[in-house]
Amino acid sequence: MEEFWISKLSHLVERDHFIREGLLKRGILGDTYHKELEKVHIENAKKLEALIIKNGFPVLSNAGEKGTLLAWVIVIHAISLPDFMKECLVQMRLAAAAQDYPLDLLATIEDRVLFFEGLGQLYGTQYDWIEGELKPVPIQDFSSLPYRRRSMGLPPMSEEVSRVTEERPPSDPVKKAVEFEHWLKKVGWRV
């Protein structure tokens, strides 16, 4: 079954990376959620959803590490489909409780959903451009963050904060923030 998931998902993730790299080279990746990238993310999510309906949710026991990671990449990019992303999060939680899903991947999806819902993240995995610097978005109960990160197999926050990105800050942060708020409401993350 592992080969099934890899064969079905590899080309979807490769296409996602190809489009992203093209936007990055053109210097427009950080300015807005580009329609071309959003289209690929939605198409990939719908294909994954159809596969899940027929074959169950991809977890370590049926998709292996690579198949699980490929599916996770599609889910983490399915930001235009909040209901799909939240349903996948439920499945990931259930699988993690059965020790059948990587905790670090679950933590990242948990934080991503919280971020898009406008809530503080739990594990410090989500970043955004704040005052020209890539910084973690708000975190709930910062004092217990080291324990939560450790419980999910994540490195200390000091190591996370120093990560480097090839993205650049948006050329017009105010415009991007306004567009982001509009997009959040349009797709259903916020009211």
Image (tube, rainbow, N blue to C red):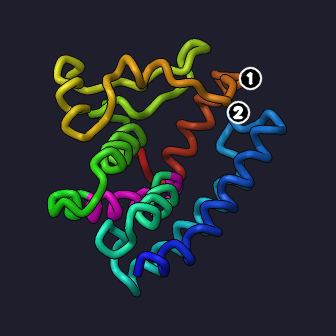
Q: Residue 171 shows which numbered tag?
A: 1
x 52%, y 27%: residue = 128
Q: Is residue 36 left or right of residue 100?
A: right
Residue nearest the viewer, comparing 148 with 170: 148
Magenta stretch containing residue 75, yes or no?
Answer: no
x 66%, y 23%: residue = 169
Q: Is residue 98 above or below residue 50?
A: above
Assess disc 1: are there few (<14), some (14-19) or many (≥20) residues with their C-alpha within 10 Å of its C-alpha: some
Q: Position of residue 156 (x, y in %)?
A: 31, 23
Q: In terms of image quadrants, where is residue 129?
A: top right
Q: Position of residue 80 (x, y in %)?
A: 53, 55
Q: Which residue is tagged 2?
A: 31
Q: Is residue 176 left or right of residue 82?
A: right
Say what amino acid the circle numbered 2 marks. Answer: Asp
Label 1's element? loop
Residue nearest the viewer, comparing 122 with 96: 96
The stretch of residues the image draws in magenta is 77-92
Quadrant location, the N terminus:
bottom left
Q: Residue furthest right?
A: 26
N-terminal of the pair, mark 1 or mark 2, is: 2
Q: Position of residue 180 (x, y in %)?
A: 57, 37
